Image: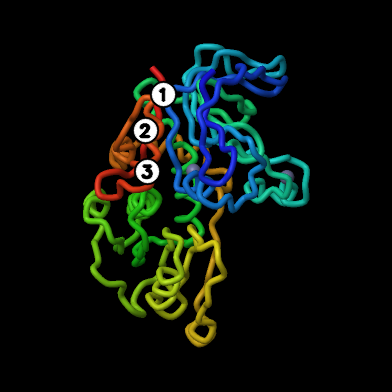
Amino acid sequence: MRALQLQGIEQLVQVTLPVPVPAGDEVLIQTKAATICTSDLHDIRSNPFGIQYPRVMGHEGAGVVVQCGAKVKDLKPGDRVASHPVIPCGDCEECMRGLQHLCSRMGHSGIDRDGCFAEYFLQRADRVRKIPGDISFATGALLEPVAVCLEAVYRAGNIKEKTVLVVGDGPFGNMIARLAQKQGAGRVMVYGRTPFRLGMIPGAEILDTVPERSVDVAILAVGNAEAAESCIKALRPRGRMVVFSAAHQPVLVDLFSVHVLELEIAGACNDEDKIEEALACLSDRTLALENIVTHQLPFDNWKEAFDLARNGHDKALKVALVFE
Ligand SMILES: [Zn+2]
Ligand SMILES: [Zn+2]
């Protein structure tokens, strides 16, 4: 099968590999669509998660089940499915506390095991969901991106009638802004730098500058220090910042403001059991998530697809590799 293997920094290479065989609790999925994530671009550029080379990349995938391990009950060949890449161990201390998304022995497609930038990929069956017939494979590939965006919104606490600022206009900032509106925020404002991307967030107020001391919630959806500082400055007393994207370097935080204004800072990483809710969101017409995937390119055009994901901010949100 054709696959994209990361072999070193800035070394993504097309290779031919044998089709993998599912273990007892796994399914083999024939990939139909796999979307490129901002984190894939970081992995290629600097490998912040310490991927061991070589590794087939890709963690946002949808396709058709072609083979099931002996212990798989709820899926069968022919099922149209989407995969969630986070694989909790189920018995570490974090898993026992109910925080499977923060598992200390977590597996993750495309990081510690081969992922879905390939004609076929394996996934543990409990991390796979059937998708309704009216959801395209490219939209199905958004299952986990939507789930992690839901986590970002939930980590903001009760946002009903509150003022929510999203800093960052990439695919994640865009989805978070849509989901915050769905969760009943009073006002959703977005600060970003790309007119095309900002124009893809219906219902949100688009800002030229980040406001000061006036929002209840500020969600950081871009990984740079300046954006992080602007989130802290935007919060009113007792406001909460949610760190969804983080700079990979430590950022100075104005703890004096945190102290005197009783601000809160919450992280959001992966998602705590949001897989079913994310699946429902994919079918929610008011969210129109299908337009998050702006480009679908045949697998063989993968270089063009990655270039678009990395540099095409003026015309692209999510880019999908598709297999006919
Ligand atoms: Zn992702
Ligand atoms: Zn665990």
Q: Residue at x 53, y 77 (%)?
A: 252
115 or 90, nearer to the observer? 115
For label 1, the residue is 132
Circles 3 and 2, Cβ within 8 Å, touching? The answer is no
Q: Which mark is residue 45?
A: none
In this rendering, position of residue 275 left or right of residue 215: right
Q: Residue at x 32, y 35 (%)?
A: 290
Colouring mode (rainbow / by chain / secondary structure / one colour)? rainbow
Circles 2 and 1, Cβ within 8 Å, touching? The answer is yes
Q: CA distance from mark 3 to mark 2?
A: 25 Å
For label 2, the residue is 283
Q: Give amino acid for label 2.
A: Ser
Please tell me how crowded label 1 is: few (under 14), some (14-19), or many (20+) other residues with Cα within 10 Å. Answer: some
Q: Secondary structure at mark 1?
A: loop
> Which quarter of the rendered picture does the C terminus lie within?
top left
For label 3, the residue is 309
Q: Give amino acid for label 3.
A: Ala
In this rendering, position of residue 52 left or right of residue 208: right
119 or 133, nearer to the observer? 119
> Which quarter of the rendered picture does the N terminus lie within?
top right
Q: Give amino acid for label 1.
A: Pro
Q: Residue at x 47, y 62 (%)?
A: 156
Q: Residue at x 68, y 17 (%)?
A: 69
